[in-house]
Image (cartoon, rainbow, N blue to C red):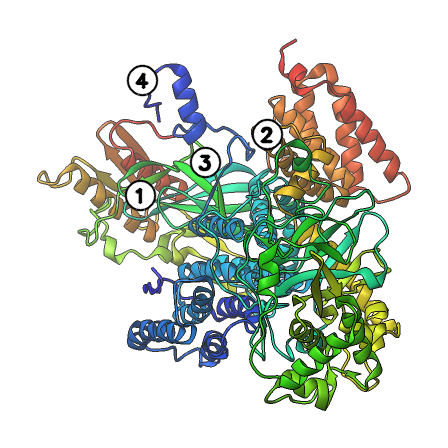
Amino acid sequence: MIFARAPASPLARSQLVWLAALVLCAQLPLWRQLPIWISAVGSGLVVASLLLPADRPLPTRVRRWLLPLLALAVAIGIRVSFGYFLARDPCVAFLCALVGIKFVETRSPRDGGLLACLALFLVLTQFFYGQSIGAAVVALPTVLVLGGALAALREAPALPAAWSAPLIATARMLLQGIPLAALLFILFPRLAGPLWGAPTDTGASSGLSDRMAPGTISELSLSDAVAFRVDFVGRPPPPAQRYWRGPVLSRFDGFEWSAQTRIRGGRLAPDRSRAIEYTVTMEPNNRQWLFALEHAAGLPRPPIDDVTAAVGPVRNIAILTDDQQLLANAPVMQAIRYSQRSTVSDRFEAAGEVDSRENLQLPRGNSRTLSFARKLREQSASDRAFIAAVLEHFHSEPFVYTLAPLLLEGDRVDAFMFDTRRGFCEHYASAFAFALRAAGIPARVVTGYQGGEINPDGGYMIVRDSDAHAWAEALLEGTWQRFDPTAAVAPSRIERGLGAALPPGEPVPYLARLEMTWLKTLRLRWDAVNYQWQRGVVGFNLQRQRDVLRDLGLAAASPWQVAALASALAFVWGLAILGFARARHARADPALALWSRLCRRLARAGLPRAPSEGPLAYVDRAAARWPQWSALLQRIGETYAALRYGPSDAARSERISVLRAGIAALPSPRQMRSPG
Amino acid sequence: MSSATAGPSWIARWRQRLWRLDAADRGPIVLRHRRIYILPTRRGLALLGTLAIMLLTSMNYSLSLGHALTFLVAGLVAAALLQTYRNLAGIAASPLAAGEGFAGGEIRFTLSLANPGASRRGIAFAARTGPPVRIDLPAGATRPVQLSVQAPRRGRIALGRVTVSTDFPLGLWRGWAYIHFPSSGIAYPAPEALPPPLPQGLEGFDVRRSARAADAELAGLRDYHSGDALNRIAWKAVARGGGWYTKQFEGSGAGGALELRWAELPPGLGVEARLSRLSAWILAAERESRAFSLALPGAELPPGSGAAHRRAALTALALFPGESTP
């Protein structure tokens, strides 16, 4: 099928150009996603075969042998470069190259049709990698070109330059089709889960992970990317309390902090009356953590505006581990929304003995910090006093908060504490937790986001990767309590964000800076548009669909009722389009429209007009058939003849109304047909 | 010509309505939704299949924009369906003329098409045989369209059912309608390829010496009709740009009227062979502008000449035996 031959009626060059435009439009958005050699093969073949002289096409022998071999080679290349083949991304890559190969051997209109179908599917694949407004905008012209290519395949354009007419015609049809498309988009049933098993492709993960080495968080902080957006039901908490808890790290090997095996069974924070309610819209990051303000008073649920929440039991979308991490049931691969309750607090009750045992482990080395901590503990009256002393140490000694710390070697905690004294939040959190453990206080590192910016356009909060943060918590008297050593070094980081805390000259991400330039205002406005896009279009899923149905008063409608409604609306749509076309034609010449209305009525009454018959002859014939209305018919005929063939003078509009009234005065075709 | 159904009348009615197998259409036929069928073309089916796969993919990966793209293209396909329908609906077709020709050749029929609505593109007319004729109809235009029907044998050749179809605008849908006018043309017997010389005239005049110029006098010019002999065309008028005319001759031509008699043909010849020879002789007489009479069993034509006479004679041959000439 794909390598079909038989060039029955070879495609004209203009048709090939249309197909090439379609294929290139479909491949273009994938260039960023696929290995460069795939794009080169796929698009290069298209361009090359167009540049080949038209009178010297590729020999049949070459096409018959070389192209299948090329396809095979590409398949092997993909297997080698991806390491696997039967998955989404390698298949997209193969399709992208295959469309190019298919183009080279496309000779007949039949091949052309097949190629158009393949290219259309290729347009869809770009949405695997992103569903931004930009992706949608890029796909639109491709659909126009698809229409142009189909029109060209039907009939080769007479002039190669006549490329705009099919595009305009397609645009008109697209506009006509949009109501139907919107209807389908809203009413077509959405699935709660995948059809054939969860898509298992492991895309690139972003954001926080279950490991933290020096540099992990500062690297993340360089990015402007949005981690999640939050709609608060009431007022958002003050900046210093915006701790979005993420991965909790208990193991330390001297270099890297990493997470424990996670156990379900965390206890929710007491759901006090002043709990904060909010809805989080998370960007996909291919990881399992859902973020909530410290500390969660409930599990994440489908958004509160969803009917299902009110109607029946909801399947939990996440669990709470014993160290207070919210873990989604599956990695977040598309934007998800969940509503969340939190009781803002910096402490929570520990699970038990296990916690204290696990969070005292120390790696070997770093003896200077060990002895410093133990000595300081001896000097302190209590654990709390000791912790205050450590924070004071960070505050009073010349520690520098910076995105560009010096390289640490050997005993890294010692080197940081006593030599370089320059670090980002992960250095402070790590050294702080280490010092506490050295003094016998169970402590661990918590990563997440701290802060968030309210977008004046839309009133929601944006939390970016530049808000990524690491802090620590210590187990004191059976309660885990949050301590943020960064706040001791650079208090403005917690109060006002990264841009305020870093010294001038640091590579602060543009949107994390404080000054409100017009460009930043514009970017925030754009983010608001994006947020609406995410919520309304990309995030349109089963829940949102139910919301819409409920708003339309169809919450209780059965599927077949919705289907019947959709069919009826589609029917009305068809009649409207046809009626609109007729009306547009009629506007061109009202006299002609009225005359053809008369002809239709008389034809239905049993007296069709002969094609060559003039208006006067026709009404004469009609008058002979229906003598009782002959005067009226004659007058209609004369008025029309005067309108059509007479001078166009001031009496024209008057004549038109005479014509309209005359036709309206005629009895219905059914009456005219009945004898007598 | 007659209905082939034996079942109850409603079955026959529906058969006729669906397939128009009987030549029951009279007068101008306006194509309306009752007559117009629309089904996807192969390309349309392929595209619909692609859309189905795209929909499944979008559902599986929960691609909202995938849904949007799929439905957008589906809307385009649906709008194309309406355009295909609109391209056909409202066209009025009526039979204009039925031509004549020789068996083994083609008979030309002319239909008149009126387009009261907006302009139409790429409408194909196809008779049972012969290539389809594609035309565009500008808004408000009336155009003739000529259809050729193969005439495998002599006699009346019906135009048969005409299929009006279009795949405008995107080639995804094919809309079509059947029109079945009772028009029929006449196929004359094919002239014998190498006929023996014409029989001698009444006065023993040698045909081969015939000189049209000698006796036949130019009676005048008439409008050219397709099929007129090339040597009768008034080429001077054509060259002057004055249009196409055919010279008409009066008079007995060479000597006297030929007598073409069925009975005088060699007795060994079969019916069709006789008709073929007579056909060839009539053409030869016409070429040489000689008057001739024709005598067939059951039919007799008095001596005469000219196009009308020739047509009457050939028609008598075509319909031999029996049926009266129209």
Q: Alpha carbon of mark 4 to alpha carbon of mark 1: how far?
A: 29 Å
Other residues around mark 2 within 10 Å, as few (<14) / some (14–19) / many (≥20): few
Q: Residue at x 68, y 43 (%)?
A: A581
Secondary element at tag 1: loop
Query: Label 3 belongs to which residue?
Result: B178
Q: Is residue B89 above or below residue A387?
A: above
Between A268 and B129, which is closer to the camera in this rendering? Answer: A268
Query: Label 4 belongs to which residue?
Result: B6
Query: Label 2 belongs to which residue?
Result: A564
Q: Residue at x 75, y 44 (%)?
A: A271
Task: Name the residue furthest top.
Answer: A676
Q: Nearer the viewer, mark 4 or mark 2?
A: 2
Q: Alpha carbon of mark 3 to alpha carbon of mark 1: how far?
A: 21 Å
Q: Please identify the quadrant where the N terminus of chain A is shown.
A: bottom left
Task: Name the residue furthest left.
Answer: B268
Between B166 and A224, which is closer to the camera in this rendering? Answer: A224
Q: Amino acid at mark 1?
A: Ala
Q: Alpha carbon of mark 1 to alpha carbon of mark 2: how far?
A: 52 Å
Secondary element at tag 3: strand
Circle 2 marks a residue in which chain? A
Q: Amino acid at mark 2?
A: Ala
Between B159 and A287, which is closer to the camera in this rendering? Answer: A287
Q: Residue at x 77, y 79 (%)?
A: A508
Q: Nearer the viewer, mark 2 or mark 3?
A: 2
Circle 3 marks a residue in which chain? B
Q: Alpha carbon of mark 3 to alpha carbon of mark 4: how far?
A: 22 Å
Res. B255 in view: no
Are labels 1 and 2 on one chain? no
Query: Label 1 belongs to which residue?
Result: B151
